[in-house]
Image: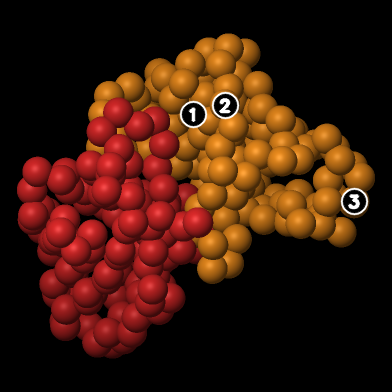
Amino acid sequence: NAGVTQTPKFRVLKTGQSMTLLCAQDMNHEYMYWYRQDPGMGLRLIHYSVGEGTTAKGEVPDGYNVSRLKKQNFLLGLESAAPSQTSVYFCASKSTGTGGQPQHFGDGTRLSIL
Amino acid sequence: DQQVKQNSPSLSVQEGRISILNCDYTNSMFDYFLWYKKYPAEGPTFLISISSIKDKNEDGRFTVFLNKSAKHLSLHIVPSQPGDSAVYFCAASGINDYKLSFGAGTTVTVRA
């Protein structure tokens, strides 16, 4: 039972390079999310999706793009990486329902931008 | 503007004693409150939640208390165990909200 799987686990990029982070969930969840975690800041929502083919901006969307072409996958793209995007990125998913339904998280991608 | 605040970045407690983690919120539209636990190099895992119609929810060693008038909730861990050493995040959501608002987290260290 894999749950939420994030690929890759670690990556080092140079400023200006691009990359895509992949999130896959096998729980048939409708909602998916991308967060970044920085020291002293908690988890901040970057983008989210409420269903296949839909995406929406979260709290800190600038510099990121996302796509949800398949229900089980949610991709986060950095078009031109900047040192300020050095962070740990978490993907999460949850089923439909009330706000009380918990989100299920992957183990994160640690990204360093030099 | 952070709507969920955990004002204590860290907490150290002796094994067997009670750990009390606090969380304050500003948005009166929040209806659900959740606590997550996070170990290093792992993702957050759901621990316990409470809805606004209750003032207490208990699950084993973990109890969450909600004071709506004060916009305050707390997580009690009794007794604390070494495996409880982790970062704890408080989160909140509206009744039909897709999204969670997270606090900055509290790092708990349980001393032997």
The quarter of the displayed image where residue B64 is located? bottom left
Does residue A110 sit above or below B23 in this rendering? Answer: above
**Chain A display color:** orange
Nearer mark to the viewer, of 2 and 1: 2
Marks 3 and 1 sit apart, C-alpha to C-alpha, by 28 Å
Give the mark, 3 or 2, whose residue is nearer the N terminus: 3
Please determine if labels 3 and 1 lie on a single subunit.
yes
Which chain is represented by red in the image? Answer: B
Report which residue position mark 1 lands on.
A32
Chain ID at mark 1: A
Please determine if labels 3 and 2 lie on a single subunit.
yes
- A112 sits to left or right of B16: right
| Residue B45, image x, y percentages | 36, 49
In-front residue for pair A89/B92: B92
Which numbered dot is residue B93?
none
The secondary structure type at the circle numbered 1 is strand
Q: Residue at x 33, y 84 (%)?
A: B12
Marks 2 and 1 sit apart, C-alpha to C-alpha, by 11 Å
Q: Residue at x 34, y 25 (%)?
A: A95
- B60 sits to left or right of A103: left
Chain ID at mark 2: A
- Kind of residue sitting beneath label 1: Met
| Residue A102, image x, y percentages | 31, 38
Give the mark, 2 or 1, whose residue is nearer the N terminus: 1
Report which residue position mark 3 lands on.
A15
